[in-house]
């Protein structure tokens, strides 16, 4: 699972095997450590939750959890639907734009780099010229 944060927006890209795990009831979770201190970390998680009617974000103690309704997760996971987009109200702080999407194979990367991704619907087309200078960049969240 890959996370991209930009301003008040979050984007999660979910690998093929992770979608299968999510649909089987697993909680997907990743943690990043920022320093040798064990408390200097941030965890993000995604799980389907039968008790919620709408996508919900919870934040406590360096952990953000995204809960998506089980029926919505199942519909997304087994269909050609690319993603789930939600605009979550934060009251007087505005809103959080949330995008959860299937991780598609990059058109300009090797098969090894595209391990466990979904088939890109644009496979067979050339990459836009604007992406060419980014070859070799190891960021997992570069636009494709």
Image: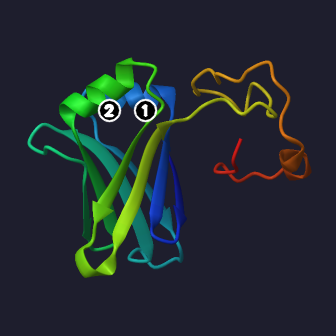
Task: Judge from the rendering whether residue 95 lies leftward or rightward of residue 67; answer left or right.
Answer: right
Nearer to me, 54 or 138:
54
Mark linked to residue 109: none
Task: Judge from the rendering whether residue 94 lies leftward or rightward of residue 134; answer left or right.
Answer: left
Q: What colour scheme was applied to this rendering of the protein?
A: rainbow
Q: Work out whether 109 lies above or below 88.
A: above
Indicate the position of residue 59 as horizontal and vertical percent values.
Answer: 27, 68
Q: Which residue is mark 2?
A: 22
Residue 87 falls in which quadrant of the image?
A: bottom left
Q: Which residue is mark 1?
A: 18
Mark 1 nearby-residue class (10 Å; few <14, some 14–19, many ≥20): some
Residue at 50%, 68% in the rendered image: 33
Indicate the position of residue 112 as horizontal and vertical percent values.
Answer: 73, 28
Task: Judge from the rendering whether residue 129 lies leftward or rightward of residue 49; answer left or right.
Answer: right
For label 1, the SS is helix
Which quadrant, please, contains the C terminus? Answer: top right
Residue 53 falls in which quadrant of the image?
A: top left
Residue at 38%, 77% in the rendered image: 39
Q: Work out whether 45 lies above or below 36.
A: above
**CB-based contact (under 8 Å), mark 1 and mark 2:** yes
Nearer to me, 100 or 59:
100
Nearer to me, 128 or 68:
128
Q: How many marks?
A: 2
Mark 2 nearby-residue class (10 Å; few <14, some 14–19, many ≥20): many
Indicate the position of residue 141 as horizontal and vertical percent values.
Answer: 64, 51
Task: Judge from the rendering whether residue 50 lies leftward or rightward of residue 101; answer left or right.
Answer: left
Residue at 46%, 26% in the rendered image: 17
Residue 24 falls in which quadrant of the image?
A: top left
Q: Work out whether 31 lies above or below 40.
A: above
Indicate the position of residue 13 as horizontal and vertical percent values.
Answer: 51, 42
Residue at 30%, 24% in the rendered image: 75
Q: CA distance from mark 1 to mark 2?
A: 6 Å
């Amino acid at each position: 699972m890959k996370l991209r944060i930009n301003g008040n927006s979050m984007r999660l890209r979910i690998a093929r095997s992770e979608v299968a795990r999510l649909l089987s009831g697993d909680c997907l979770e990743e943690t990043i450590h920022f320093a040798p201190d064990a408390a200097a970390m941030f965890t993000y998680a995604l799980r389907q939750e039968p008790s919620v009617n709408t996508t919900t974000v919870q934040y406590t103690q360096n952990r953000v959890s995204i809960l998506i309704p089980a029926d919505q997760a199942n519909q997304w996971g087994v269909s050609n639907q690319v993603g789930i987009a939600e605009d979550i109200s934060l009251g007087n702080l505005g809103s959080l734009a949330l995008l959860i999407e299937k991780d598609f194979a990059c058109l300009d990367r090797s098969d090894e780099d595209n391990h466990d991704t979904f088939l890109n619907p644009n496979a067979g087309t050339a990459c836009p010229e604007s992406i060419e200078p980014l070859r070799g960049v190891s960021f997992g969240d570069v636009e494709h």
